[in-house]
Image (tube, rainbow, N blue to C red):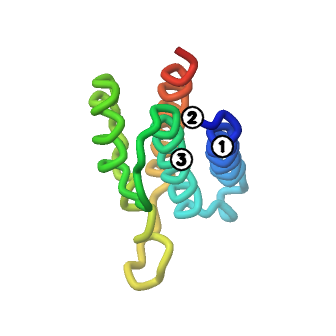
Amino acid sequence: MNDEYLQKWIIKADNDLKVAKHEMNADKDERVTEAICFHCQQVVEKYLKAFLIFQNVDFGKTHNLEYLLELCSKRDKEFRGINVGNLSFYAVEVRYPDDFYIPTVTEAKESIKIAKRVKKFVLNRIKN
């Protein structure tokens, strides 16, 4: 495992979380909930990939959180308890006008909670 490479994934994940939090704190009429949810999906995706890198597991190119969780669960059964909610939906669907959907503020807040939980969980696993 390359520590520097792992740290780059963590930095990128943390930057996505900063963007989501910053956007959530914007004025109500300026808040872009699909951006918040998208960045939270990215946080979770990158933290799961960081764990897999830590474990020297190849994951290919994917945005599918359920698939990444399955890979993580094969190395650590505790990952089976992680609930990523609807975050996989926000990886692609909310980014394009074809499937026009704007998440609610409640969905955005829940996305941030999930992202923070996954971050904490993975960092505890990487430190051990």
Q: How many marks?
A: 3
Q: Say above or below: 99 vs 71.
A: below
The alpha-carbon separation of the residues under discs 3 and 2 comes to 16 Å
Q: Residue at x 72, y 56 (%)?
A: 27
Marks 1/2 in contact by CB < 8 Å: the verdict is yes
Please state, as top left, top right, bottom left or bottom right, where the N terminus lies in the image. top right
Within 10 Å of disc 1 (Cα), the crowding (few <14, some 14-19, many 20+) is few
Q: Say above or below: 15 vs 1.
A: below
Q: Say above or below: 40 vs 1.
A: below
Instruction: Pinpoint residue 124: horizontal percent, then vertical percent.
Output: 53, 20
Instruction: Pinpoint residue 10: horizontal percent, then vertical percent.
Output: 64, 40
Dot placed on the residue nearer the N-terminal end, 3 or 1: 1
Q: Amino acid at mark 3?
A: Lys
Q: On the rendered structure, is 88 left or right of 104?
A: left
Within 10 Å of disc 2 (Cα), the crowding (few <14, some 14-19, many 20+) is few
The alpha-carbon separation of the residues under discs 3 and 1 comes to 12 Å
Mark 3, residue position: 46
Front in this rendered view, residue 50 or 18: 50
Mark 1, residue position: 5
Dot placed on the residue nearer the N-terminal end, 3 or 2: 2
Give the quadrant of residue 72: top left
Discs 3/2, front: 2
Instruction: Pinpoint residue 73: horizontal percent, then vertical percent.
Output: 30, 32
The kind of secondary structure element at disc 1 is helix
The kind of secondary structure element at disc 2 is loop
What label sits on residue 1 in the rendered view? 2
Discs 3/1, front: 1
The kind of secondary structure element at disc 3 is helix
Instruction: Pinpoint residue 112: horizontal percent, then vertical percent.
Output: 53, 42
Q: Amino acid at mark 2?
A: Met
Q: Say above or below: 1 vs 99.
A: above
